[in-house]
Structures are given as structure tokens and as C-alpha cells.
């Protein structure tokens, strides 16, 4: 009797969703629409004096495996002020073949002020991540957005030697594409030291979108170890690459400075970055 054919195991996958719509109100914003589906949850912790309304996108599963997907949507109506962050770093575990997918869309109304400040995403060795951030805003809105990636768990001596990363940003002003950026890494090329990111274990991007972004360029050049430049009218870009602790420290200093100078917020990090 012939042997039974092997059965392909179907692993359970997470499909998390979070949608948040806000209108102007006391403290900066009031909820107009809220929806979330496991493993994503939206939390609204208390804020320090002077800070706008704060919301945290929380993955209650504690991490993401290959084949998991998160879909996040944030909409601010006219005049709303809001800070979006996460309660901790996101972890992307080693994949068995499928990619982890994270898609985020941020849309601002006229005169809205938004901070998109998730804490770092850590790629375990063997992780496969496809991530995109879509931003749509009118000319008079103000946005401070930052994303940081850590390539391997440095404290364990781990490098991102196997896996893949595809990271994309798209920024539209009044419906027209103003800036696009993409990064693709296919390991084991990632293990080739100085031939990729000069062997950096982490990298980060910060974007300031304001009508007066050019006025903040001199300050930004003193904050960004990887350089700062105007990529389009009203769009100021800062970069970092290096050791994870140094990159996080650089991003934190830039966020604290630019949120005060460009958005009128207190010169400190949001509470969840400090706890």
C-alpha cells in the first residue's frame, strides 16, 4: 500500500485592522469613527499638559509572524490635532516563507496637525516584511512622521542575515504625488557588511510636512546623522543609519525639537516613548 501523501500544514494567520476618524475637539480631537479587529487595538492614554490627544495602535499578539497582516487607517478632519504612536516596539519574527504585511494610511483635513510616531520595528533574522505608508494631506496641514527599523536583535548578537524587507512611503499633497521612497533588501545580501547600509544595524526616516518646512532645514541638519534635505516644497526629510541605540536617540532628539518648533507642541517625546 503506497505511503499517504504529505499533508501541507495551514498555519493560523492574524489579520488585524484599525480605523480611526477624528474631528476637532477639546484637547485636539474627538473620536468620530472607531473600528478595530484583533490583534489590533486602539488605546487612548492620558497625555501630559500641552500635548494633543494621544492614540496608540497596539498589537495585542505581541509580535508578527510570516503571513500576518495589519491594516491601519487614520483620518483627521479639519482643524483636528492628534498624535499616533505605539506602546512598544513591534517585533517581526522569522518567517516560514510568507511575508508579514503592514499597511498604514494617514489622511489629514485642512489645518489638521498630526504626529505619526510609532516606535521601532525589530526584524528578527529570517523575517520577511512588506510595509507601506500612504499619506494624503492638503497644503496647509502639518505632519511629523517617523519610522525606524532595527535589523536583527543586537543585544543577542543577531544580524539580519536571512530574510527580506520592502519598505515604501507615498506622500500626496491635494491628491498629487509629492514624494515617493522605497527600500528593498533581499538577504543574504543584507549580511554583506559595508556593501549594504555600511553594516548599520538600524535605520530611520523622519518627514516633516509643513508650509514652512524650509525654515527648519538648518536645525534639521544638526539633528540628522544621515543628513537632512528638502525633497519637495514643504517636505523636509531626515535620515539615520547606525547602531540601534544611537539611531533611536537621534530620532528622539529630532522629534522633541521639531514637534516644538514646527507644530507648537512641548519639546519632549510623547508619553509612551518615555515609559
Image (cartoon, rainbow, N blue to C red):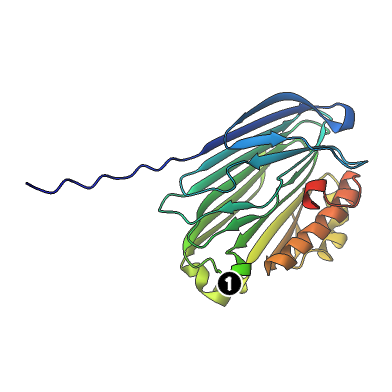
Tell whether 65 sits left or right of 11. right
Q: Residues within 10 Å of mark 1 (few under 14, many from 20)?
A: few
From this viewpoint, which residue is outermost toward the front?
Answer: 1
Front residue (pair 3, 227): 3
* The furthest residue to the left: 1
In the image, 255 versus 244, the foreground residue is 244
Residue 29 vs residue 208, the one in the foreground: 29
- How many labels, in total? 1
| In the image, residue 161 above or below residue 12 | below
Report the residue that reaches farthest toward the top. 32
Locate residue 263 relative to residue 196 in the image: left or right: right
Of all residues, the one furthest to the bottom in this rendering is 194
Regarding residue 232, the answer to whether it shows in the image is no
Vertical position of residue 54 compared to residue 235: above or below: above
- The picture places residue 260, in percent across and down from the top left corner, at 90, 49
In percent of the image, x 9 and y 48: which residue is there? 2
Where is 225 relative to 122, above or below? below
Secondary structure under the numbered disc 1 in the rendered image: loop
Judging by the rendered image, the residue that carries numbered circle 1 is: 157
Going by the image, does 25 lie left or right of 115? right
Residue 113, position as x, y percentages in the image: 82, 38
Answer yes or no: is residue 13 visible: yes
| Quarter of image, res 228 | bottom right
Amino acid at each position: 500500500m503506497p505511503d499517504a501523501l504529505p499533508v501541507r500544514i495551514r498555519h493560523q494567520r492574524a489579520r488585524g485592522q484599525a480605523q480611526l476618524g477624528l474631528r476637532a475637539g477639546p484637547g485636539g480631537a474627538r473620536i468620530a469613527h472607531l473600528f478595530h479587529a484583533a490583534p489590533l487595538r486602539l488605546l487612548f492614554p492620558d497625555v501630559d499638559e500641552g500635548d494633543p490627544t494621544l492614540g496608540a495602535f497596539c498589537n495585542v499578539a505581541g509580535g508578527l509572524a510570516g503571513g500576518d497582516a495589519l491594516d491601519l487607517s487614520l483620518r483627521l478632519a479639519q482643524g483636528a490635532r492628534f498624535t499616533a504612536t505605539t506602546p512598544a516596539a513591534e517585533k517581526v519574527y522569522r518567517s516560514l516563507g510568507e511575508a508579514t504585511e503592514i499597511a498604514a494610511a494617514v489622511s489629514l483635513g485642512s489645518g489638521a496637525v498630526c504626529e505619526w510616531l510609532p516606535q521601532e520595528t525589530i526584524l528578527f533574522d529570517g523575517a520577511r516584511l512588506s510595509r507601506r505608508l500612504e499619506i494624503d494631506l492638503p497644503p496647509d496641514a502639518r505632519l511629523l512622521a517617523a519610522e525606524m527599523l532595527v535589523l536583527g536583535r543586537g543585544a543577542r548578537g543577531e544580524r539580519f542575515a536571512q530574510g527580506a524587507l520592502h519598505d515604501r512611503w507615498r506622500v500626496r499633497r491635494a491628491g498629487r504625488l509629492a514624494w515617493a521612497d522605497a527600500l528593498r533588501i533581499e538577504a543574504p545580501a543584507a549580511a554583506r557588511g559595508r556593501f549594504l547600509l555600511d553594516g548599520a544595524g538600524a535605520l530611520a526616516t523622519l518627514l516633516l510636512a509643513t508650509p514652512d518646512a524650509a525654515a527648519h532645514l538648518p536645525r534639521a541638519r544638526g539633528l540628522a546623522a544621515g543628513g537632512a534635505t528638502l525633497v519637495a516644497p514643504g517636505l523636509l526629510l531626515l535620515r539615520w543609519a547606525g547602531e540601534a541605540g544611537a539611531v533611536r536617540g537621534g530620532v528622539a532628539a529630532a522629534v522633541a525639537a521639531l514637534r516644538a518648533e514646527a507644530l507648537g507642541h512641548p519639546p519632549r517625546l510623547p508619553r509612551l516613548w518615555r515609559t
